[in-house]
Amino acid sequence: MTERFALIHNPRSRRNGKDDGTFRNSAARLLGPLFVRPSGREHVQDAVAELARREVGTIAIDGGDGTVSEVMSAIYRHSPADALPALAVLPSGNTNLIASDVGFGLRGVAALDRLGALARDGGLRRTTVRREALAVRWSDPDRPAALGMFHGAAAFTRGVGIAHRPAIDRFSHDIAVGVAIASSIGRLALRSTRRKWLGGNRITLAVGEEAPRTEDCFLFLATTLHCLPRRVWPFAPRTGNEGMSYLNVQAYPPRLAAATWNLLRGRSPEWLDGCPAYERGQTDRLALRIDEDFVLDGEILNSGPDGRTFLSAGPAFDFIRGVA
């Protein structure tokens, strides 16, 4: 029995901009109206709403982390919570952290051919992995929740801002991030900016059911992913499939160079685990107040007039593997 699937293709994604029309024409022939090339966020909402109305059970997303976040957010708004479509993530963007964990494994015409073969065989959901999204809500009840899988604030937001500068953003993602990290480290070495960067941001944080606490934060990260590219894993080892991993680095953290070296390599030496300045854990919800922007899947978002956001794990999606 042939299954139906839709493909949401972001023509503005870095790799998709190099398409000579071969992929686009092949997808249009195979999928007809189920091949969607949104022109903006509103078009994504409309397209996903139409796919939900037609009860399309599988959606392939051809883009980067920002595109995946937009599509998941739209699905959350328009699909029943007990009937979320399965997703196939084709990594074509500037940032592809999500695909490094739950990606389809192929992109371009190869991915299209594989999806078509699975659909004809009735096997689109034959091999899947389940992950919870990271949902961000604001204190304003009228502002829709944003779904993603990787959240960052404080120094992380500044670093992403550097990576998004035109002189850097024209490079590939790996080079852009490398330049951003080098620029950040350079700012710590300069007396004029070291105090500002290390002093961090004033935040109020509540983990799970704990009481809120206010402190100065150098770096804050949270994710529902289970792995990152190149074996980078600054979080504590996961203890289960559910919940968010988070890292809260206090202002003026001791032994920052050694901690960074270990965190980026996924190592947990005893001194780091015992240092309160590097708080790492796993939870199903966080409440965060910070009077600056934050980053969700590579996109910079504002924290709202009062700076209050609420992070939670879920809903869960099935991600299709094209390559075992």
Image (spheres, rainbow, N blue to C red):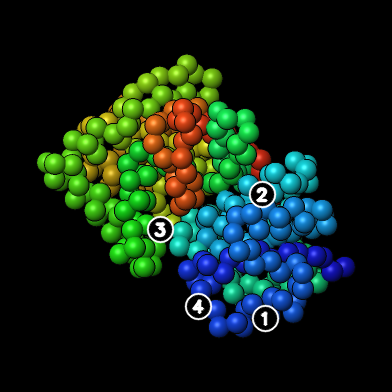
The relative height of residue 38 versus residue 24 in the rendered view (above or below) is: above
Q: What's the residue type where badge 1 is placed?
A: Asn
Q: Quadrant of residue 157?
A: top left
Q: Earlier in the sequence, mark 4 or mark 2?
A: 4
Asked whether the residues under the numbered discs 1 and 2 touch, taking CB atoms below 8 Å apart as contact, a structural biologist would say no
Query: CB atoms at circles 3 and 2 under 8 Å apart?
Result: no
Q: CA distance from mark 1 to mark 2?
A: 26 Å
Which sits in the foreground, 38 or 284?
A: 38
Query: Which dot, 3 or 2, sits closer to the camera?
Result: 2
- Dividing the picture into quarters, in which one does residue 195 lie? top left
Pointer 2: residues within 10 angstroms few (<14), some, or many (20+)? Answer: many
Image quadrant where one finds the N terminus: bottom right
3D distance between C-alphas at marks 3 and 2? 30 Å
Label 3 or label 4, whichever lies nearer to me, is: 4
Q: Which residue is identified by label 2?
A: 74
Which quadrant of the view contains residue 229? Answer: bottom left
The residue pinned by badge 3 equals 230
Whichever of labels 4 and 1 marks the residue nearer the N terminus, that label is 4
Circle 4: residue type: Lys
Q: Which residue is mark 4?
A: 18
Give the CA separation, mark 3 to mark 4: 25 Å
Please state which amino acid type lies under the numbered disc 3.
Arg
Numbered circle sitting on residue 25: 1
Taking the spot 18% from the left edge, 42% from the top edge, the residue there is: 193
